[in-house]
């Protein structure tokens, strides 16, 4: 073959443009309201419109992780807004925590929080992360994320759609970087 | 008793429990249970799942030659039972979990370490006779490897990527993995405890969240177990819609994982390409059925949403585009030697181990074990559909990728057939309040999901046990990684893609 398959892919993108949807970067109004309450003015001017996020699965069923992946795919492309996922809490501004926090994960979550340098924010993602969701009351579940670390913003949904995730994170970005 | 005795012949010596559907359940006394374990040493009966109650232990078995399925139960008021793990190593972790959760002691199980219980719950034996504790974590003694130049690498539970939590303890010599040991249980949510006493609708929601990537498969297994227990006839169209959703779920998971495997071999463009394909399915799911991952769409009695005419058209349209995009990506995989060099010969799982552990799904099929619940025991509408189950023998990362590629092609053909042949009619039948026991086996993208349950007269769940295929796959990852370099672990791990949440329950 004259042109390897990768050449076709690259040509397609050059000719037709990326798969990325337009828009989708509007901050969620409810999230802005929540953040105005929890953050006040102390945190502004810190981040220069860029957020580094460390994701922590503290007991989720993995559906929230799937939708975080979707928010990172070329269609939603979270990175075009300056939001990126990092490998270590030591590099992070934000912890994005999913799941009802299980007792077996509570210490790991607390230690991840402690390892994140200030200023830092915690976003609890999904209905379980609010109050334990359908697993609340179990002997193995501590409850919502706020039972273990302080929470600045909650993104609802089971699981939240990439659009909701984006809306929440954009609101956080606006609130802390104004 | 040795020699050629079939599973049902053997178990029928026990007392058959009335009302267990669709397969029989037999209660065995201590002697008969012990004889069953001894017989398993010379038979090829496979364990499908093993679970317990406060004073009874259950095992779902399949007689491999006949395909017959039955549950053997052993009431053990003295809280001890003869361990199956003595003849089936795949049951070791199941029996460690039974000891943690129900407080029943498996006699003959060497490994005395707890499994799901990390000492942090504030209670021992939460599902048996609970005893309050201080909730101080146990120290866990990892298995060792000794020799010159060996070092340990602890990884997790919080990993570097956006994945579920678990701990991996490597013993390595330079770059080479000498021993990997997994420690799981971090996302144990006490799901069986949560399910007890729940009305059907609420229980279905919880079972649909045992492992979020397999929500259709779990909801389907739960619904089929309920329908078996209560003798509910599901409308024909509902069967077809369930299969449609199950295949869409399989497609979405397979394409994304193929991309993610390539990404772990530093070939990121595949992840981007596959991410776009997956997104197309999720959007179609949302507009056709009202949920991107199809959660809570399969319910006892049928399905919660019918497929409208526009949805039918959207899916038909999607199919053609999807196939084209997918084949382009496959050509890219096939023609990138640097990528094939990473996947070929890496993380080999020998066929003998896959058979010994009863590993299902693409992991089993890439190592010559071609079991698929859609074929056997089978369930509608797959008996009316034409599809093949791909099987390879190499057992490496490449074979697992190739099996998944073939499964994507098969699922695309299945979706096509389903859209063309689906009958019209109602999609939901009423579910009565009645007592009963039921079980179902369903093929998720990962392998066989089993749900067993007992319902009360009031139509509530008395007990429900969901079993994830990962139970028989996780231990094999430890074997497959041996002798590989540490840097190839993410690649091997992703090619297995076992569920943490489904396993930890």
Image: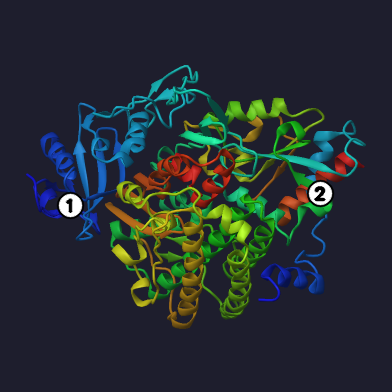
The chain that hosts pointer 2 is: A
Picture coordinates of residue B304, whole percent (x, y): 49, 65
With B321 as the anchor, is B245 left or right in this view?
Answer: left
Task: Tell me the quarter of the image containing the N terminus of chain A.
Answer: bottom right
On screen, B285 above or below B130?
below
Camera-near label (1 vs 2) is 2
Q: Secondary structure at mark 1?
A: loop
The span from disc 1 to disc 2 (Cα, nearest Å) is: 58 Å
Question: For residue B324, what is the image quadrant?
Answer: bottom right
Question: For residue B165, what is the image quadrant?
Answer: top right
Mark 2 sits on what residue? A170
| Picture residue at 74% right of the left edge, 41% below the top | A53
Task: Tell me the quarter of the image containing the C terminus of chain A.
Answer: top right
With B292 as the anchor, is B171 left or right in this view?
Answer: left
The chain that hosts pointer 1 is: B
On screen, B155 above or below B457?
above
On screen, B310 above or below A54?
below
Q: Secondary structure at mark 2?
A: helix
Picture coordinates of residue B316, whole percent (x, y): 57, 79
| Res. B9 visible in picture | yes
Within-10-Å neighbours for mark 2: few <14, some 14–19, many 20+: many
Mark 1 sits on what residue? B18
Towards the viewer: B140 or B443: B140
| Res. B505 visible in picture | no
């Amino acid at each position: 073959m004259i042109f390897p398959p990768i050449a076709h892919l690259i040509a397609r993108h050059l000719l037709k443009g990326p798969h990325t949807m337009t828009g989708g970067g509007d901050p969620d109004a409810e999230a802005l309201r929540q953040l105005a309450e929890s953050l006040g003015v102390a945190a502004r001017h810190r981040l220069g419109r860029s957020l580094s996020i460390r994701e922590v699965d503290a007991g989720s069923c993995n559906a929230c992780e799937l939708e975080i992946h979707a928010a990172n795919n070329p269609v939603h492309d979270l990175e075009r807004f300056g939001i990126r996922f990092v490998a270590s809490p030591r590099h992070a501004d934000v912890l994005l925590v999913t799941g009802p926090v299980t007792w077996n994960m509570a210490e790991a979550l607390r230690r991840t929080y402690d390892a994140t340098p200030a200023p830092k924010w915690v976003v609890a993602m999904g209905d379980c992360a609010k109050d334990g969701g359908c697993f609340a009351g179990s002997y193995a579940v501590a409850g919502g994320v706020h039972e273990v670390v302080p929470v600045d913003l909650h993104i609802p949904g089971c699981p939240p759609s990439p659009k909701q995730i984006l809306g929440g994170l954009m609101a956080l970005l606006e609130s802390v970087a104004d | 008793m040795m020699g050629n005795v079939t599973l049902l012949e053997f178990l029928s010596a026990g007392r058959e429990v009335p009302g267990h559907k669709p397969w029989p359940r037999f209660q065995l006394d201590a002697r008969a249970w012990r004889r069953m374990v001894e017989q398993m040493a010379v038979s090829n009966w496979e364990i499908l799942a093993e679970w317990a109650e406060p004073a009874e232990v259950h095992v779902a078995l399949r007689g491999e030659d006949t395909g017959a399925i039955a549950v053997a139960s052993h009431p053990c008021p003295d809280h001890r039972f003869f361990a199956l793990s003595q003849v089936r190593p795949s049951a070791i972790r199941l029996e460690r979990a039974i000891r943690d959760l129900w407080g029943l002691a498996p006699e003959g199980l060497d490994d005395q370490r707890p499994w799901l219980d990390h000492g942090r719950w504030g209670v021992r034996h939460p599902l048996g006779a609970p005893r309050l504790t201080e909730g101080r974590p146990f120290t866990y003694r990892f298995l060792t490897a000794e020799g010159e130049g060996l070092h340990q690498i602890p990884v997790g539970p919080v990993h570097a990527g956006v994945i579920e939590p678990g701990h991996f303890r490597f013993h390595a010599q330079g770059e080479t993995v000498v021993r990997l040991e997994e420690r799981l249980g971090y996302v144990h949510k006490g799901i069986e405890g949560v399910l007890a006493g729940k009305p059907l609708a609420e229980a279905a929601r919880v079972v649909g969240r045992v492992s979020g990537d397999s929500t259709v498969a779990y909801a389907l297994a739960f619904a089929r177990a309920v329908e078996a227990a209560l003798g509910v006839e599901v409308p024909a169209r509902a069967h077809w819609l369930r299969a449609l959703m199950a295949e869409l779920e399989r497609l979405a998971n397979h394409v994304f994982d193929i991309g993610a495997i390539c990404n772990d071999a530093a070939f990121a463009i595949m992840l981007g390409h596959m991410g776009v394909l997956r997104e197309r399915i999720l959007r179609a799911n949302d507009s056709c059925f009202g949920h991107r991952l199809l959660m809570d769409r399969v319910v006892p009695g049928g399905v919660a949403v019918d497929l409208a005419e526009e949805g039918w058209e959207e899916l038909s349209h999607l199919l053609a585009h999807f196939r084209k995009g997918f084949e382009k990506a496959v050509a890219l995989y096939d023609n990138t030697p640097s990528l094939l060099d990473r996947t070929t010969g890496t993380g080999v799982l020998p066929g003998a181990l896959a058979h010994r552990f009863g590993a299902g799904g693409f992991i089993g099929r890439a190592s010559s074990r071609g079991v698929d619940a859609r074929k056997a025991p089978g369930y509608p509408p797959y008996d009316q559909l034409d599809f093949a189950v791909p099987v390879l023998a190499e057992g490496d990362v490449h074979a697992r990728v190739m099996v998944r590629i073939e499964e994507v092609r098969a699922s695309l053909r299945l979706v096509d057939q389903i859209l063309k042949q689906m009958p019209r009619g109602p999609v939901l039948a009423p579910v009565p309040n009645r007592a009963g026991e039921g079980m179902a086996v369903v093929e998720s993208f990962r392998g066989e999901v089993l749900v067993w349950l007992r319902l009360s007269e009031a139509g509530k769940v008395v007990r429900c046990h969901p079993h994830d295929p990962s139970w028989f796959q996780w231990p094999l990852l430890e074997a497959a990684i041996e002798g590989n370099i540490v840097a190839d672990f993410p690649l091997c791990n992703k090619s297995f893609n076992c569920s943490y949440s489904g396993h930890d329950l």
